[in-house]
Amino acid sequence: MRIAVLTGGGDCAGLNAAIRAVVRTARHRLNTDVVGYQRGWNGILEGDSILLDNDTVRGVLSHGGTMLGTSRSHPDLLQRGAQPLIDQLRRDQVDALVAIGGDGTLHTTKMLHEAGFPVVAIPKTIDNDVFGTDVCVGYDTALTVATDAVDRLHTTAESHDRLMVLEVMGRHAGHLAAGAGIAGGAAAVLIPEQPFDIDHIADQLIRRHQDGRNASIVVVAEGATPIPDTIPEYDPVVDHWGRPRLGGMGELVGRLLAKLTGYETRTTVLGHIQRGGSPTASDRLVASTVGAASIEALASGGGGNLIGISNSKVTLRPITEIAGKTRRLSREQIDLLVPMTTAADMRRRSSNR
Ligand code: F6P
């Protein structure tokens, strides 16, 4: 059985660890080398691949990015369907594919599976929003970077009596914003799942400062949305494929909060720093686990599945049930943010009793 691997969509830390696990397990379990397609689905469409063996993946475990390169292009967007992919895979004598990616990659993976080609998917995205797994490769590293940013903002905010707004990634889900906000002790967290009321956030911050705090951090997910018609609209830039390139909500929130609270405010956009650098130990473990499990799945006829982790166990979930869905913060997770961000409110209410 000849296996191929590719990485699609935005990069993140831990992709090389996953590729390494795929290659090493394929050698160990199936006694075969692996075909690595370059720059995501483009590599298949353009017949651009390299041979991956144990030597090629030596030392990559701790390296960020992806040794195969990646791209946001996928055959769906190119309107070319599954057949050109299958034709090239056959020409390269590939019997099965491991696709490491997020929602776009899953879409194409589903198409391939429905066309009868054996394929499994490994979930990766710093947004951590792939349905059917508790955790995606890349999330823990991004969370660590974002939490470190909140910690650093605290010290400078306190030195200058400032309000600091930190915009983090998170297009459709607030895992990263909520994670960094809770772990870093932010005063408020704005997430895509729950439209925010800017006046309410400003009131909370004012009460907090009346209660004696001289500085506050507000974490804003790039995909956070206001209650309709409550703040001026902002139009994100559109990328090559017509998809909004987010970023800008932090600036807008910072400007509005400065005006509403009167506090000196600064905004930081963390951007792609969250995606870069060496993976954390947790991301290396997750990537190595699902990478190895992907080969086990293909070897035992488990094609058509997303290889995820739920309740600390490897899980196989049908791609047909997963593609097109987003794992957002649960109601319980959102509710956890409420006591944190209204602590000043609650203290004031109880002292007024
Ligand atoms: O990979 C997901 C993501 O990190 C989103 O949170 C963000 O909106 C997007 O990628 C940015 O992508 P690009 O690298 O194309 O700017």
Image: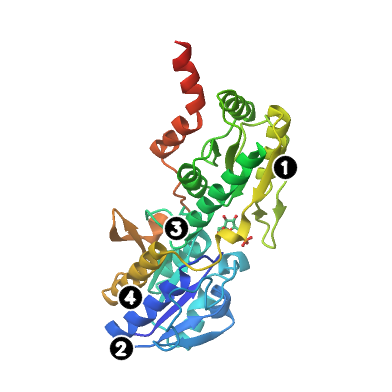
Circle 3 or circle 1, nearest the eye: 3
**Any part of residue 221 in sight:** no
Give the residue number, with chain letter if any, for mark 3.
140
Check the image and name the residue furthest to the top. Answer: 353
Ligand 1 picture quarter: bottom right
Callout 3 amino acid: Asp
Looking at the rendered structure, the secondary structure element under dot 3 is: helix
Quote the CA–CA distance across marks 3 and 4.
23 Å
Quote the CA–CA distance across marks 1 and 4.
45 Å
* Dot label at residue 295: 4
* Dot label at residue 87: none
How many other residues sit within 10 Å of disc 2, few (<14), some (14-19) or many (≥20)? few
Contact flag, marks 4 and 2 (Cβ < 8 Å): no
Contact flag, marks 3 and 4 (Cβ < 8 Å): no
Is 275 left, or right, of 311 in this rendering?
right
Looking at the rendered structure, the secondary structure element under dot 1 is: loop
Quadrant of the image for the N terminus?
bottom left
- Callout 3: CB less than 8 Å from ligand 1: no
How many other residues sit within 10 Å of disc 4, few (<14), some (14-19) or many (≥20)? many
Q: Earlier in the sequence, mark 1 or mark 2?
A: 2
Callout 4 amino acid: Ile
How many other residues sit within 10 Å of disc 3, few (<14), some (14-19) or many (≥20)? many
Quadrant of the image for the C terminus?
top left
* Dot label at residue 31: 2
Quote the CA–CA distance across marks 2 and 3.
32 Å
Please tell me which residue lies in front, 270 or 309. Answer: 270
